[in-house]
Each structure stands twice: as structure tokens, then as C-alpha cells.
Image (spheres, rainbow, N blue to C red):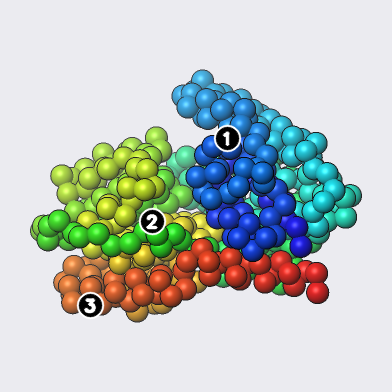
Amino acid sequence: MKVTVSVCGRFHAFNLAQQLQTKKYLHKLISTYPSFAITKFGIDKQFIHSIWHLEALSRSWYRLPVWLRGDRNLQLWFVEEFDRSVTNSLSSGFDLFVGWSGYNFWSLHRAKELGAKTIIERGSSHMHYQTEILKEEYERWGLKFTETHPGIYEREIKSYADADKITVPSLFAKRTFLEQGISESKLIHVPYGTSLAEFYPVPKEDDIFRVIHCGGINLRKGIQYLLQAFYELNLPKAELWLVGAIAPEIKPFLAKYQSDRIIYKGKQPQNQLRWFYSQCSVFCLASIEEGLAMVQPQAMACGLPIIHTTNTGGEDIVRDGIDGFCVPIRTVETLKEKILFFYENPDKREQMGRNALEQARQSLSWDEYGEKIVNNYLYLFN
């Protein structure tokens, strides 16, 4: 088996490629990242095909103010230009093509023409479910959801039908595909891992109770509900740390729930995150929609118990009542209840943190992920 992996950006594709390389199944990794950045993930340069100029153009465009970006057709242009470049770069010599949903449509068909089997990687819920629930959430707050470009939506939906298989990272994501009529036999379900060499506990430097959110600070991540829950609890000697980039849409909520106990830590490099996790007591992800947020296994590997919603993919890796708690989306009172439980029960909090750490070490490494995903790939050829 020889596998070509195609990704616009990074996601978990470099971890996948590294696992395939170790097992001698990697044929090529196509990405918009420059080669020197990819080799840091242990990928041999001989396997890399970099379309770096698109990454440079895309990042420059996204740095522009929203009002200046204006026409979202450029978003579609980047996707189509990547797909066109991948299509032109494909040649015989591989027998499995793994491409990221939305970004690989023409290239998927080219891979089929070359005789390869095809898999679409979908890191979130079904595109229809994702779009509808996020439209609903934005409307709750008097905003319009414009993130999903209609052209990208169409490409994504078509790729679901055209690919031989679709990979999803969680039972939550899988259910959204089944609800849209996708056959279970077409789905590959393998949860993501994390780097145990990069994420591990380091000493906590004080005794302050802290809840940490790591990731985008936006409506999709449910920050509006977490802010309200923490603010209303008003716990003495407690803090909420927000690590990530703030979206303009969330600024009114930060102003409404302003407190010296709610602390914005900014966007941090991944190799610094273990310190931030380790200075905290509980990790909380109140997301409205995710596939499987990789910050969850990261936090577990740093010894934190997890509070997550039903729509984060957390149920695949967090044992409810053992490593943390699962709560419904948009439930401020339940978030308050679980945060208060950890605040008032330090012994149980520490035990659940130890449980989470052990769970991460036993079953959430990238090597575990690699074994599972490769076995699923090989099954296609049996």
C-alpha cells in the first residue's frame, strides 16, 4: 500500500503522514506548508510536495481586516487553486489517496483515474449539520453566519458521495453523517491522538483554582456560555483562563462578563501549552460543534479532568464521571454545576485528573491512532 496525503494547511495530516512513513506506507505528503516546517514533524523531505506560495497568499489575505477582505470568493479561489495544483501534481505510483474534505475534489477524481482508492478526511460534523447548527447559534445572538462559502459547501457535499470512504474522528461526527443518509459502511471512525512527548504535566506554581479554555474564542466554541457560567459562580480564589485568538463576535460577551478573574492569555505556541494546562485545575470546552477537538487529549495528557459538551467528540476519549463530565450544549446551569463540583471537591478533581492522564498515556498517543487508521486503510485492499 502506498498512500498520498493531501492537505491545505496542516490539521492532523502531518501526524498521519508520520505514522504512514514509519510503517513504510507513505508515498507523498502534499501541503501548503513549506518543506522546512513539515520536516520538523519527522517527515522525510523526499516525501514532501509543498505548495507554499498558497499558504503565504492565504495568510496574508486572512490578516486583512474583515471589511477589507470583502468578497468571500477569494476563499473559494484558494481552495480551488490548491485542488488544481494537487490535481496537476498527481502521477501513478500510489494506490490510496487521502484528501481533506472541501479542498480535494478534482484531485480526488484524478486519483481515481490513476486507479487509486480514495478517502475524504472530515474533521468536523457533516457539512450540512455544521452549517445549520452554526447558523442557528449566530441567529440566537442577532448575527449572520457567513463562514461557509456556498461553493465550498457544494464541493464538500459532492466529495462525500464521490469518495470510497469518509474518515471521521468521533461518534458525534459519525452520527451527523448517518442522519444525512450516509451508509455506516462508508465511514471510518478513528479518534485523534496527541503527542505524549509534547504534552505532559509540569509543576503547578500556586494553589489557585483555574478553569482553562484553549482554542478559538468565538461563538462556535461556546465561549458565551462558559463566560456566563464562570461569571455567575463568582468563586473566591478562582480564575478562568482563555487561551486563543479572540473573534470580533465575542467581544460584547467579554465586555458583559468582564472580571479580573477572567484572564485572556492570547494565542500561544503549541510547545508552550503544557505549561498553561498544568497551571490550571480543569479544562472546559463548551463547543456548539466540533469533530474531535485535539485540545482535549492534550489537556488530559497534562493531567486535567475535562468538562466537554456532547458536540465536541469528547465522549470518544473522556469517560464520563471518571476523566471528566459531558454536558449538553448551551446549558449554563450544568456548566456551573460541574465547575462547582471540581471547585468544592479537590480530592475528586485530582483523582479524575490522574485518571485522565492514565487514559491519555494508555490509549491516546499518535502511535495508537496510527495503528487504528492504518488497519482501516489496509482493510480496503482485502
**Badge 2 vs badge 1, beta-carbon distance below 8 Å:** no
Rendered residue at 44%/59% (across/down): 195
Which disc number belongs to residue 26?
none
Between the C-alphas of marks 2 and 3, the distance is 26 Å
Q: Earlier in the sequence, mark 2 or mark 3?
A: 2
Mark 1 lies on residue: 34
What secondary structure is marked by label 1?
Answer: loop
The residue depicted at 35 percent of the width and 72 percent of the height is 356
Q: Residues within 10 Å of mark 2 (few under 14, many from 20)?
A: some
| Residue 87 at x, y percent in the picture | 79, 40
* Front in this rendered view, residue 26 or 145: 26
Disc 1 and disc 3 in contact, CB within 8 angstroms: no
Q: Name the residue tied to disc 2.
A: 198
- Mark 2–mark 1 Cα distance, whole angstroms, equals 22 Å
At label 2, which amino acid type do we have?
A: Glu
- Image position, residue 246 (x, y; %): 37, 39
Q: Which residue is mark 3?
A: 348
Instruction: Residue 57 in the image: state x and y as whole percent.
Output: 58, 26
Quadrant holding the C terminus: bottom right
State the quadrant of the N terminus.
Answer: bottom right
Q: Is residue 164 above or below residue 83?
A: below
Give the number of the mark in front: 1 or 3: 1
Quadrant of residue 88 in the image?
top right
Give the foreground label among 2 and 3.
Answer: 2
Precedes in sequence: disc 2 or disc 1: 1
Cα distance between the residues tagged 1 and 3: 46 Å
Classify residue 4 as left or right of residue 52: right
Query: Element under label 3?
Result: helix
